[in-house]
Every structure is written in structure tokens, then in C-alpha cells.
Image (spheres, rainbow, N blue to C red):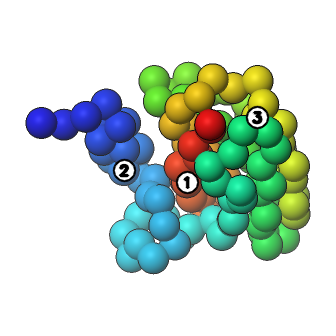
Amino acid sequence: MQTAVDSVTNWYQRQGFFYSSLSEKGPKAASFKLHPNPSSGFVTIETDIAEAAVLTIYDVSGRIMIQQPIKGNTLLNIGEYAKGLYFVEVAHTSARSLRKLVVE
């Protein structure tokens, strides 16, 4: 039986996203680190992407929680988010990547 998380994960994978830079398929991974994870307050996004990128956070239903340009390291306040699973995407012209974020 497929869970809601599996369903969302499969949808993102069909769109060409993947969750790890270890993946050999799909577009090139946009390298970024997300910590602390899980979190209940602030999250740091660390990226070595030299050009401007777009950070998007989705809830499990695919609703965009935040979308903003980033470059380098970014500190996000997620203290107002409901507890649960979110997806963090960093994308730019030639690469993108998606990570899971757990809000406690």
C-alpha cells in the first residue's frame, strides 16, 4: 500500500526531481545542505552554487510555502510551520535538487 509520502515522492521523481546527489538519473543535482533536520525553529541552507538559485519549500500536498531567490548560505525561520514533512527544492538554470525537511 502506498502512503501519502510515497505518492508525493513518486510525483516529484516523475517531474525530474530527485532526493540525493547520489542519483545518476535526471538533471544534474544542485548541491545543497539542509541543517538541522529535523528542526523546529531555524534551518540553514548551504549551497555552493555560484549563480543565483531559487529556493522553494512545499508541504506534502504540493502547496508552495515559500519561494525566494538565494545565493550562498540562507537562514530560514520555519518556527511557524505546522509539524510534519516538507520538501525543500533548490533550482537554477542547469541543476535542481530536492530534500526532505521534518518540522518538529
Q: Quadrant of residue 23?
A: bottom left
Q: Quadrant of the C terminus?
A: top right
Label 2 amino acid? Gln
> Residue, x 71% and y 56% (percent of image)?
36
Looking at the image, tell me whether mark 3 or mark 2 is earlier in sequence order: 2
Residue nearest the observer in this picture, 54 or 80: 80
Residue nearest the observer in this picture, 78 or 65: 78
The answer to whether any part of residue 92 appears in the image is no
Q: Which mark is residue 99?
A: 1
Q: Which mark is residue 13?
A: 2
Q: Closer to us: mark 3 or mark 2?
A: 3
Q: Closer to us: mark 1 or mark 3?
A: 3
Q: Sort mark 3 into few (<14), some (14-19) or many (20+) by Cα contacts within 10 Å.
A: some
Instruction: Report, in whole angstroms, how far the alpha carbon at label 1 lies from the one at label 3.
Output: 15 Å
Q: Closer to us: mark 2 or mark 1?
A: 1
Residue at disc 2, secondary structure? helix
Are the residues flagged by discs 2 and 1 in contact, CB closer than 8 Å? no
Q: Residue 46's x, y, as percent?
A: 79, 64
Q: Residue 13's x, y, as percent?
A: 36, 50
> Residue, x 72% and y 58% (percent of image)?
35
Residue bearing mark 3: 78
